[in-house]
Image: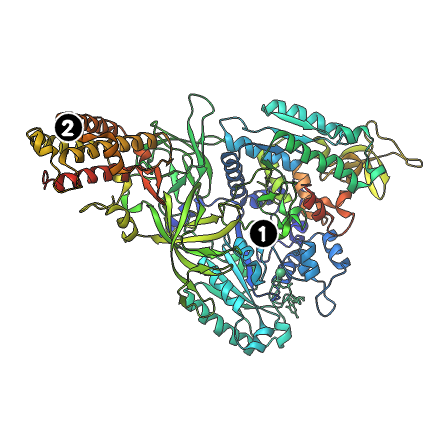
């Protein structure tokens, strides 16, 4: 299949026509978003307010331009999100004119579900997984876009772009549908659904480069700043409004940032001087630890992410 | 922001031999301008594919400390000589770690100063061939691993190595490199390597794989993966990474006639109607004359619209939205191609043969119908014939009625709606399709189109119900206006003779039990009434399930023999006049719509032609026409 350029001119033309890697990824993601909108009856986008969601949202704007995004955004609010995240969510979605659905497992929240009481796994199970599955069912959504990337974690490296979920919302890693070329199988029976991951092939570095190149706004928590911190379970925990301190805990001021955004009690901060996108990118390429390292949930047991994914967590 | 980061950029293992970026801005620039290469691993179980990928990631410093620490801590370790088990970096599923095999594709990512790479690490186990094909379908390069130690014992390439090399060639992966692994176990012997190279060269020659390179490596010890081996001074070629960084990217899709399958019609308001899609091959330019398939309507590209502003041109694989100068009928599943280039058109046909990799426990069988998804179009495809099954060891062609899981065969399909395609060899995107089970929705097969079926054997069987009539060769070339004209002139031609016919002659049966002329014209009225229904309905819906009609019964039930002859004739003339009027204004785009009748899918174009042929058949039988 190799065709060689016959002339210098032709070679140059071909070179000019070839897209760079960010353009290639963008084109692929836009195509995935459009395909799903064409084929599913009721798609929804899971919007986590994080950097990956921000990229995914911009890609959706691009995919349907000059039209508006033709599906709602769904935020599963555990009630433990940083206040900065909620503020950003409300302002930004209003600004771009997107429809936002916020879903909370009010019953569990009222019963006082917390990572301290239940442990991170059970807490996630109730406030995230259960809540997400309920929200998808209530909305009758047959497809949900998620911002997960294969480079995040090794069980995610195994996931298809169209990730099939059975009637109970569960993932069976051993019997995934073969996914060849860019031909995605969207056929479902009643009750089944598909998670669609348009950012599957993006790396963390790609996401930051794209945020920078496209000037996409993100939650300020990603940028280093002097913040009140306690050291809890070895992690730097950001002391936010309404947070209770345990006996003996001492609040210190530190210049920190968040590398990924989850729930406040379970997302550790990292010491950093990086307060602009280029400096974050610079830090990232010299940094030798993965982005999920500061998330408590991935460390509960070996293969814990796979267990959560089977149950329906993203 | 302009901090000097020379040291850190090098530390990330940005490949050898390039000048490091001087400032951070320069680094960003160069990094964003990088091109992307996708490669896949393939080979027999335990050849060391996952270990090789782990080694590649590790030696290019693409593994985070915490991930490496987790691997070192793991309870499982299958690596010899106290080495870290690098396969655990990609074997991410619990079942994989427990069984020590790869089950499903793992996608991993890394970059050097030269390129960004997407790796698909695939399973070697035969049971998971479908996952190997998944990983290989998008690859620019296939790394076929061959276990030097296993070869030394067996004296031949393992069947699975042959199968995977064959699948790589079928999937049209532009470059194939053999990594002869576990050289540490054969004493880094040049002789062992040469013996394997000869075998592999022979296999590639048999498969017609021209561009092929062989590299001796040890994934475990790290020889010739990223760094050149100190154990094999006799090897003068590139290391695996050097090869991956420099192999030229194939250009087949960036050149060649343009293909733009329509994914979505965007209509945000009354003033804008755009066709969204990804350029599947070639380049689309504002101002270009384009043709829509299947309607063959032409227009000009007014704008190429994107969120970032209009483009003068869009090339493979860009995702864009196209606005046309004219309001032509075009929807999802249809395609824009270059106008004025008849020879550059894709095939438009509902019959083709394709190489199929079967992926399901329930075998493919002749006569079965599956959904086929091709570009943005999903149709029903029926297996007409299995031309042959391939024996992956000998590559011989064997006769077969079914295709079992993991088998490969050439199969002839007939679809209910035509597809617009190229051969897979010419264009991966417009030559590939997946097959989906119509009941359980599983993806059961992958197909690569070889060619359109042009021998008219089975189409003719449908068409030749009437003497002298043949199936339209090209639906897209049918002109409803011309057909309407034909019908009117036939009626005008025979009408004088019929009007002159006496009532007795019209009412007389030529033999007991046979229709009289009057009854035959009654039947022709029924034909007109029934086809009027089909032709109208098929313009309003793409698929139609409608019963046929019992010809003898209809003539009996309506007692045509009791009517005055001239009433029957007048009815026949009026019905045909109205039918011709209807046909004249049929929207060409609907000519491909189909009526499902007795297991056949008859297109509207066929039905109109067939109606006229049927009429002529009866007129000839009555000696009214030559
Ligand atoms: N001595 C030696 N052993 C190796 C080498 N490469 C891999 N191995 C060992 O071979 C075994 C299989 O390695 P894997 O990487 O899991 O093989 P694989 O090809 O990925 O296997 P599947 O994915 O299940 O098909 C492991 O025990 C590895 O440690 C090598 O270069 N030398
Ligand atoms: Mg493996």
> Is B489 placed above or below A149 here?
above
For numbered disc 1, what is the local secondary structure?
A: loop
Residue at the image position 74 percent from the left and 68 percent from the top: B82
Q: Residue furthest top?
A: B270
> Is B602 placed above or below A137 here?
below
Which of the labelled discs sits on residue B569, or is there none? 2
Do the residues bearing badges 1 and 2 touch, measured as CB atoms within 8 Å? no
In the depicted view, which residue is nearer to us: A42 or B196? A42
Could you say where residue B525 lies in the image, as x and y percent from the top left? 21, 31
Could you say where residue A168 lies in the image, as x and y percent from the top left? 66, 40
- Which residue is under mark 1? B113
For numbered disc 2, what is the local secondary structure?
A: helix
In the depicted view, which residue is nearer to us: B372 or B620? B620
Q: Badge 1: few (under 14), some or many (20 or more) residues near its Cα, within 10 Å?
A: many
Write down the quadrant of residue B78 in the picture: bottom right
Q: Chain of mark 1?
A: B
Q: Quadrant of the C terminus of chain B?
A: top left
Residue at the image position 55 percent from the left and 34 percent from the top: A59
Q: Chain of mark 2?
A: B
Q: Is B120 left or right of B377, judged from the image as shown?
A: right
Q: Is B624 left or right of A203, judged from the image as shown?
A: left
Mark 1 or mark 2: whose residue is earlier in sequence: 1
Can the viewer see residue A223 in this picture?
A: no
Could you say where residue B175 lies in the image, as x and y percent from the top left? 47, 59
Displayed-image quarter of ligand 2: bottom right
Given this view, does label 1 or label 2 mark the residue nearer the observer? 2
Q: Is A30 left or right of B624, judged from the image as shown?
A: right
Can the viewer see residue B377 in this picture?
A: yes
Pointer 1 residue Cβ closer than 8 Å to ligand 1 = no
């Amino acid at each position: 299949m190799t065709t060689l350029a016959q002339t210098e001119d032709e070679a140059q033309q071909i070179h000019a026509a070839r897209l760079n890697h960010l353009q290639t990824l963008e084109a692929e993601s836009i195509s995935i978003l459009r395909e799903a909108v064409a084929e599913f009856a009721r798609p929804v986008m899971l919007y986590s307010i994080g950097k990956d969601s921000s990229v995914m949202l911009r890609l959706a704007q691009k995919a349907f331009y000059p039209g508006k995004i033709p599906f709602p955004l769904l935020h599963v609010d555990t009630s433990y999100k940083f206040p900065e995240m909620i503020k950003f969510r409300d302002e930004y979605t209003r600004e771009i004119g997107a429809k936002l659905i916020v879903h909370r497992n009010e019953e569990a929240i009222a019963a006082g579900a917390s990572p301290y009481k239940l442990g991170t796994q059970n807490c996630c199970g109730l406030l995230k997984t259960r809540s997400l599955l309920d929200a998808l069912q209530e909305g009758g959504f047959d497809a949900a876009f998620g911002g997960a990337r294969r480079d995040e974690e090794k069980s995610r490296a195994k996931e298809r772009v169209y990730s099939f979920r059975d009637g109970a919302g569960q993932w069976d890693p051993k019997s995934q549908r073969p996914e060849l070329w860019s031909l995605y199988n969207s056929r479902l029976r009643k009750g089944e659904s598909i998670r669609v991951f348009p950012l599957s092939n993006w790396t963390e570095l790609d996401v930051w480069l794209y945020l920078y190149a496209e000037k996409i706004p993100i939650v300020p928590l990603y940028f280093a700043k002097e913040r009140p911190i306690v050291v809890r379970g070895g992690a730097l925990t950001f002391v936010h409004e309404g947070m209770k301190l345990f006996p003996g805990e001492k609040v210190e001021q530190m210049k920190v940032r968040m590398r990924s955004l989850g729930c406040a009690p379970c997302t550790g901060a990292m010491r950093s001087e990086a307060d602009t996108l280029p400096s974050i990118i610079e830090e990232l390429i010299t940094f030798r630890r993965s982005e999920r390292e500061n998330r408590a949930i991935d460390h509960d047991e070996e293969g814990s992410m796979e267990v959560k994914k089977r149950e329906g967590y993203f | 922001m302009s901090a000097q980061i020379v040291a850190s950029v090098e530390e990330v293992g940005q490949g050898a031999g390039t000048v490091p970026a001087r400032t951070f801005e320069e680094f960003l620039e160069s990094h964003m301008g990088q091109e992307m290469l996708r490669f896949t691993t393939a080979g027999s179980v335990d050849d060391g594919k996952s270990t090789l990928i782990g080694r590649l990631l590790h030696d290019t410093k693409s593994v985070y400390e915490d991930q490496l620490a987790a691997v070192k801590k793991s309870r499982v370790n299958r690596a010899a000589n106290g080495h870290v088990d690098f396969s655990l970096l990609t074997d991410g599923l619990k079942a994989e770690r427990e069984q020590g095999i790869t089950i499903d594709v793992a996608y991993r990512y890394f970059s050097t100063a030269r390129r960004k790479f997407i790796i698909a690490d695939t399973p070697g186990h035969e049971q998971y061939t479908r996952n190997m094909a998944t990983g290989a379908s998008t690859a620019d390069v296939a790394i076929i691993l061959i276990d030097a130690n296993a070869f030394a014992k067996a004296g031949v390439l393992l069947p699975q190595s042959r199968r995977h090399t064959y699948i790589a060639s079928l999937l049209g992966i532009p470059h194939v490199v053999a990594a002869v692994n576990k050289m540490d176990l054969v004493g880094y012997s040049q002789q062992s390597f040469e013996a394997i190279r000869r075998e592999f060269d022979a296999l590639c020659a048999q498969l017609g794989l021209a561009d092929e390179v062989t590299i001796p490596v040890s994934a475990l010890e790290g020889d010739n993966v990223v760094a050149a081996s100190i154990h094999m001074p006799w090897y003068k070629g590139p290391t695996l990474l050097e090869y991956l960084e420099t192999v030229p990217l194939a250009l087949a899709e960036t050149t060649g006639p343009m293909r733009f399958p329509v994914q979505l019609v965007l209509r945000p308001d009354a003033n804008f109607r755009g066709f969204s899609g990804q350029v599947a091959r070639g380049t689309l330019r504002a101002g270009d004359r384009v043709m829509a398939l299947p309607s063959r309507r032409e227009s000009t590209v007014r704008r190429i619209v994107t969120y970032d502003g209009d483009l003068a041109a869009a090339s493979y694989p860009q995702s864009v939205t196209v606005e046309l100068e004219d309001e032509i009928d075009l929807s999802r599943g249809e395609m824009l191609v270059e106008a004025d280039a008849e020879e550059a058109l894709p095939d438009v046909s509902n019959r083709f043969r394709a190489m199929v990799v079967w992926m399901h426990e329930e075998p493919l069988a002749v006569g079965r119908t599956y959904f086929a998804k091709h570009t943005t179009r999903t149709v029903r495809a029926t297996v007409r014939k299995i031309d042959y099954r391939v024996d992956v060891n000998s590559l011989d062609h064997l006769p077969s009625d079914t295709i079992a899981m993991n088998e490969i065969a050439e199969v002839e399909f007939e679809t209910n709606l035509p597809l617009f395609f190229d051969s897979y060899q010419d264009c991966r995107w417009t030559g590939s399709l997946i097959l989906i089970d119509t009941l359980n929705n599983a993806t059961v097969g992958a197909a690569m189109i070889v060619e359109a079926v042009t021998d008219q054997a089975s189409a003719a069987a449908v068409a030749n119900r009437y003497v002298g009539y043949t199936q339209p060769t090209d639906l897209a070339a049918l002109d409803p206006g011309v057909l309407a004209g034909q019908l009117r002139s036939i009626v005008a031609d025979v009408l004088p003779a019929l009007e002159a016919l006496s009532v007795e002659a019209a009412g007389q049966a030529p033999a007991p039990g046979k229709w009289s002329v009057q009854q035959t014209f009654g039947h022709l009225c029924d034909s007109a009434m029934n086809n009027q229904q089909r032709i109208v309905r098929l313009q309003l819906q793409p698929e139609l399930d409608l019963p046929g009609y019992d010809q003898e019964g209809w003539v009996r039930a309506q007692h045509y023999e009791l009517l005055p002859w001239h009433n029957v004739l007048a009815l026949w003339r009026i019905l045909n006049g109205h039918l011709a009027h209807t046909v004249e204004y049929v929207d060409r785009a609907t000519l491909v719509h189909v009526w499902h009748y007795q297991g056949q899918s008859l297109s509207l174009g066929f039905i109109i032609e067939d109606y006229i042929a049927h009429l002529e058949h009866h007129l000839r039988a009555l000696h009214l026409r030559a």
